[in-house]
Amino acid sequence: MTFRIPRAIFLAISLFALLHGQMAAQPTLREKIGQMVMVTVTGDSVEERNPSMDTLKQDLARGLVGGLVMYTWSNNLMNAGQIAHLTAELQLRSGVPLLIAIDQEGGNVARLGPSNGFNATPTAYQLGTVINQESFTRGIAGTMASWFVSTGLNINLAPVVDVDVNPTSPAIGALDRSFSADAEVVALHAGWFMDEFHKKNILTTLKHFPGHGSATTDSHTGFTDVTHTWSAGELVPYTRLINQHMIDAVMTAHVFNSTIDTVYPATLSPPTINGLLRSQLGYTGVVISDAMGMKAISTMYGADQAIELAVRAGVDMLLYTTNLDSAGKSLPSHIVDVIERSVLDGRLSRERIDSSYTRIRSLKNRITTGVASPGPEGLPHTLALANYPNPFNPTTTIRFTLPRSANVRMEVFSLLGSAVATPVNEYLPAGSHQYAFDGSHLASGVYFCRLQADGLVQTIRMMVLK
């Protein structure tokens, strides 16, 4: 089945969902916990009638899902038009903006490829070791990021920053998922990869912390111990990219490493997440678990026990490759029940939930505000555009950054494409700028603000509410 949805309508639907979430009342404890749940649904359209999709629609309406991860095997990724239709409809069904993710590493792990109408892409190993050119890595990443923009996907569960310590490691090296055996090269290519996605306002995820590249077994299939193969050098990509303030999210590994924690694997380990990642490396963003159904977790711990342990360890979002439990009922509802009960019984604090909720909402806000990272001498290294407040009545402040001095033209367009204002049309120096925009002459509705600067273009969506 092929679906097509006009780009303007798709953007309007997505924006409506975003703004509806921003204007919602103070969330309940259950709704906060719901933001910590990321699941997979089966189906290519919200109109499809099957238990998985029917249950998801109910869970979205109840605020029990914060994110979705999509796969070809679950019939989510049939072709570009169908994906755009599905993501727009899912956003519309949710009271809070959804993170909608895929694993698009390139090569052997690429959910968008020839099977669903996209191009084949090189592996990370080909990019970082065989070719090892900044322009080539950026070109491939930029192309993939454009696919996210056109389909409504907003977070990539990539790049892999595992160092290729063991080329035969079944989950990493054997699949050419690592950029290089050199941790510094891994950091460089991951940074270029992430930067190209950020230019198109798409989030990225570093994985798998604290390092899966030395493993001799696969955590998909069972207990994976890296105690005697892992080294601190595998943290270099995280250190470099944390210092560059580039990281949107980090995904944990299900590996056991007794040099860090003698009891639990990384996903369930407070010394690994709250200790090493947050306290020692200084990371303050969202932590996403690897799939909780993988056997390194599911064969060692009860499902409810793993949920509580992961949250206590510092995981913000729990990822599952289904949305139904073993009885065919709502998995998100069950997860929320488990965490809520742990809070009410005093095993988890409300503050612990609030911290995850705040990090997740901050991450989601970045999809629409797009803050530029500083470059040399404090200047931004990319064009960025944002406005606040949004929605507004009647004024808002439009802020933008320029990586270099340029002729700048900013225009505001209606949903139908008619120009309604030109707030800026002049030569400006590199750096940060802001302008007050008065929308008192505009009717309520969706508008697009486009910024052009010597060949660079950024567009944001704004809403006037009167």
Image: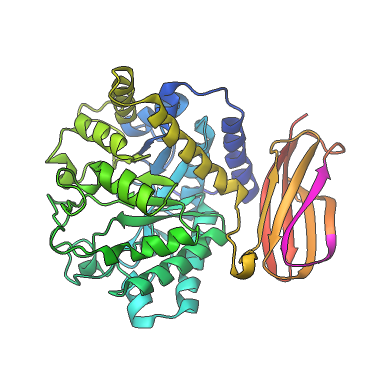
Tell me the quarter of the picture where residue 149 sits. bottom right
In the rendered image, the residue lying farthest to the right is 441
**Residue at 60% from the left image edge and 52% from the top image edge:** 370
Q: Is residue 314 left or right of residue 93?
A: left
Q: Position of residue 60 (x, y in %)?
A: 44, 29
**Residue at 23% from the left image edge and 59% from the top image edge:** 212
Q: Position of residue 257 (x, y in %)?
A: 18, 53
Is most of the magenta stretch helix, strand or loop? strand
Numbered circles on residues, count: 0
**Residue at 22% from the left image edge and 35% from the top image edge:** 306
Q: Position of residue 412 (x, y in %)?
A: 78, 50
Residue 432 lies in the magenta stretch:
yes
In the rendered image of this protein, does residue 159 appear above or below residue 275?
below
Q: Which residues are magenta?
A: 425-438
In the rendered image of this protein, does residue 292 appear above or below residue 141?
above
**Residue at 47% from the left image edge and 69% from the top image edge:** 192
